[in-house]
Image (cartoon, rainbow, N blue to C red):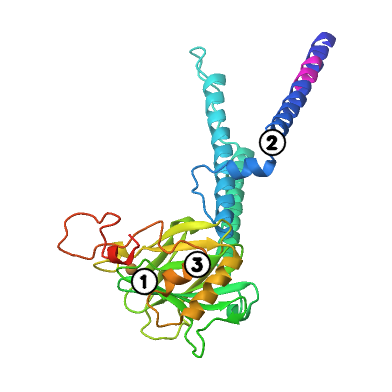
Amino acid sequence: MIVAKGGSQVRRKVLARTGRVAVLAAALMLVLTGCSAHDVERDLRFGWPTGITDQGTRMRVLWTWSSVAALAVGVLVWGLIFWICLRHRKKNDDIPRQTKFNLPLEITYTVVPFIIIVVLFWRTVVTENYVDKLTANPTKDPNTVVVKVVAFKWNWEFDYESNKGQATTYDSSTTALNTVGTSTQIPILVIPKGTKVRFIEHSQDVIHAFWVPEFLFKRDVIPYGTDATTRDNQFEITATTDGSFVGRCAELCGTYHSQMNFEVRVVDPDVFNKYLEALKQLGPNDPARQAEALTQAGMSACATTTHPFNTDRSLRAPTQPGTGASDAGGCT
Ligand SMILES: [Cu+2]
């Protein structure tokens, strides 16, 4: 008896020491490879695409931890299956002990999944509420830029309604600073990095959908047959990565649906302010104001992520860059 007790104590000590060494080794590896717990968590993506918004990051965190929870449950279930297969495999021809039920076990495997579902539901609702959160009085808010997105067959108009609480209109008019896409010009939406942007989605004809894949978010643009925007869909994002990103219409809206591309440029707030100032100086009637204002703000005048399409309906081949109707305009 004494020998057996001593043996189990030794085993426990060895196990404890192995555990301590493993934890220390893991911590040392993290420090030596320059990874923080935050880095590890950020890289645990499980196939989740890279977003460029604060909201996208929150969705990714939900995905990461849902996947970790699913894996943990998976490992437990696989472990139990293998354990039961090995531990209770057929060893002789005796009939195994026959049992009826095990109340504690049944309560456990009812309550535990219920708790898991409650936690997943709760975290999903919290994340959804964060993604759908809207600022009260956005046009007066000192931290928000308001853009009205007007969809029409088959292009986009972007109206910059206000910039951090200041209304942005052309001189001597109430028209918001804007750009309008045409078959020869991809509309480019410029937004400031690190600033909340409120989108008001307005449609003039049919249902379109505003989709920037890197936002990891899309929302329908519903026509209500009125100029009022009170019923229009609205949402907010805060872009955290600068760059140019393609945007698309994600609702089959008609003949040129597939050609309703636009570009989003996420830039420093200084560059954004310069761009708005340049638009204002150029006035609402200059059809080339988008390209000119982009140039004045130090940006490329042409879209870099997509190109104008050839609108010839008899064409039986996809449009290649440079073959669109815009060749004369310089942006191909
Ligand atoms: Cu559309």
Please state the horizontal and vertical placement of residue 330, each as a whole percent of the image: 34, 63
Q: Which residues are magenta?
A: 10-15
Please name the residue that numbered disc 3 is placed on. 190
Residue drawn where x is 27% and y is 54% of the image: 320
> Label 2, label 1: how many angstroms apart (C-alpha)?
46 Å
Nearest the eye: 14 or 331: 331
Pick the quarter of the image with the C terminus.
bottom left
State how far apart marks 3 and 1 are (Cα): 13 Å
Q: Which residue is mark 1?
A: 181
Q: Name the amino acid, label 2.
A: Gly
- At numbered mark 1, what does the secondary structure look like: helix, strand or loop? loop
Give the labeled residue for mark 2: 34
Q: Residue at x 23, y 65 (%)?
A: 311
| Residue 75 is a magenta residue | no
Which of the two residues, 106 or 58, is positioned nearer the viewer here? Answer: 58
Query: Could you say where residue 293 lies in the image, as x and y percent from the top left?
Result: 47, 71
Ligand 1 within 8 Å of disc 1? The answer is no
Instruction: Evaluate if marks 3 and 2 touch, with contact meaning CB atoms under 8 Å apart.
Output: no
Which residue is depicted at the point 60% across and 61% down? 126
Q: Quadrant of ligand 1?
A: bottom left
Location of residue 100 with respect to 178 vertically, above or below = above
Front: mark 3 or 2: 3
Q: Residue furthest top?
A: 3
Image point (53%, 31%), residue name:
78
Q: Are circles 3 and 1 on residues that touch, CB within 8 Å? A: no
In this picture, residue 32 sits left or right of residue 247: right
Under circle 2, the secondary element is loop
